[in-house]
Amino acid sequence: MASGDTGYGGLAGDLFLRLAADGLLALDTEQAAGIVAELVRTLDSVCLLLRCAGEDERESAADWLIPGERVAAVAVDRRSLEAARQELPKYIEAFRLVRDRAAAS
């Protein structure tokens, strides 16, 4: 294993879950709740991008009125989005554990 390699392939969802479950990840309740909210919004955005990326491009009236080639607003890397869709729930669960532990203490 290379120096600095965590063994998690660059994705740390399992690591965060383990740290949270072992009580080694600690934040106050408000911080953890804020992180959970942001992660949920990010997961929603990832899911929306994945749904939109699967749709056929449709022409709009603007395509006829605006000269030049159409350029996609967002270049979607499906592999990265799929990885995020798999990993983000782990982060969310980890920070929920942290939030709930902080609230109970």
Image: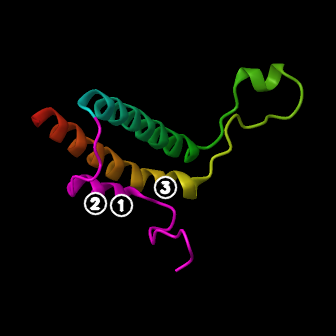
Circle 3 crowding by C-alpha within 10 Å: few under 14, some 14–19, many from 20: few
Q: Check contact, mark 2 vs mark 1: CB within 8 A.
A: yes
What is the CA distance from the residue labelled 3 to the residue labelled 1? 19 Å
In the image, which residues are magenta? 1-27
Quick check: 96 left or right of 61? left
Q: Which residue is mark 3?
A: 82
Please identify the quarter of the rendering in which residue 101 is found. Answer: top left
Residue drawn 39% across and 48% down?
Answer: 88
Amino acid type at image mark 3: Glu
Q: In this picture, is 54 found above or below 69?
A: below
**Residue holding disc 2:** 18
Residue 76: x %, y % from top left = 63, 47
Query: Of tags 3 and 2, which is closer to the observer?
Result: 2
In which quadrant of the rendered image does the C terminus lie? top left
Q: Position of residue 44 (x, y in %)?
A: 41, 37
Under circle 3, the secondary element is: helix
Depth check: 13 or 32 in front? Answer: 32
Crowd around label 1: few <14 · some 14–19 · many ≥20 (10 Å): some
**Disc on res. 15:** 1
Q: Position of residue 84 (x, y in %)?
A: 47, 51
The spot of residue 13 in percent (x, y) is 38, 56
> Which of marks 1 and 3 precedes in the sequence?
1
Q: Secondary structure at mark 2?
A: helix
In space, the residues marked 3 and 2 are separated at their CA atoms by 22 Å
2 on left or right of 27: right
Residue drawn at x 78%, y 36% is: 71
Amino acid type of the residue that numbered disc 1 sits on in the rendered structure: Leu
Q: Residue at x 27, y 53 (%)?
A: 24
Label count reads: 3
Q: Main secondary structure of the magenta part?
A: loop
Q: Residue furthest left?
A: 104
State how far apart marks 2 and 1 are (Cα): 5 Å
